[in-house]
Image (spheres, coloured by chain):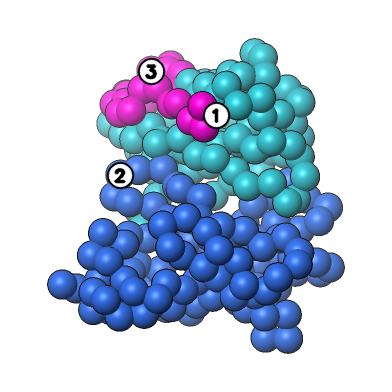
Chain colours: A cyan, B blue
Amino acid sequence: DTEVTQTPKHLVMGMTNKKSLKCEQHMGHRAMYWYKQKAKKPPELMFVYSYEKLSINESVPSRFSPECPNSSLLNLHLHALQPEDSALYLCASSQDWGAYTEAFFGQGTRLTVV
Amino acid sequence: AQSVAQPEDQVNVAEGNPLTVKCTYSVSGNPYLFWYVQYPNRGLQFLLKYITGDNLVKGSYGFEAEFNKSQTSFHLKKPSALVSDSALYFCAVRGLDTDKLIFGTGTRLQVFP
């Protein structure tokens, strides 16, 4: 199993809503990531979890709140988002924290904030 | 700080011809370099990586990449392009002491029949 599964695939939410994005992997990977990607742009790193602990927060606004309940799951809780937060949100995982390991990406959640 | 540059926004090539997608990097210490491909409305798929050893790295779908330390480049190549190779290609770098995978701006490859 070399898949990273993200749900939902599409999400439309109002600016006052609270929603969550979910990511799951069963490859035994110990590092998990959230990236944000705007159209025709490269993915931008948001958060990194290493061994279920938050290791990197790229100065992301607090309306985005990550959570790693266990080594297979990664959530991104969304609250009071702005229309400019509309983007493709990608989850990824890698075997370890090591620099040599490649990351495997999910298909993403297309988020639209109205 | 580490970075990668992809100097071409778009590369056009005829089916059956060889293709090259360029990438240059800047990193202190030994670089760990990756290529990913992204099809429309999809996540990124890993193609290949350079860690150490042979400068020519072979990857998925017939792609290969050549690491050149003196030119700080890691160009993606394929001997014979397919229409189905048309997609967005990202070069990425990770430094030894960081968990950050930093992406280039991407190159759109268009293969014409």
Residue A22: x and y in percent read 48, 21
**Residue B55 percent across, percent down from the top left:** 68, 74
Q: In the rendered view, would you say A73 is above or below A44?
A: above
Q: Nearer the viewer, mark 3 or mark 2?
A: 2
| Label 1: few (<14), some (14–19) or many (≥20) C-alpha neighbours in 10 Å | some
User: Could you tell me residue A29's position as x and y percent?
Assistant: 66, 29
Q: Is residue B6 visible?
A: no
Magenta range is A1-21
Q: Which residue in the structure is indicated by mark 2?
A: B41
| Three-letter code, disc 2 | Asn
Of tags 2 and 1, which is closer to the observer? 2
* Amino acid carrying mark 1 in the image: Phe
Q: Residue at x 50, y 77 (%)?
A: B22
Q: Are marks 2 and 1 in contact (CB under 8 Å)?
A: no
At a point 76% along the width and 26% down the height, the residue shown is A51
Please state the chain letter of the residue tagged with numbered disc 1 in the rendered image.
Answer: A
Q: Which residue is mark 1?
A: A64
Quarter the C terminus of chain A occupies: top left
Residue A17's mark? 3
Label 3 and label 1: CA atoms lie apart by 12 Å
Classify mark 3: helix, strand or loop.
loop
Residue B71 in the magenta stretch? The answer is no
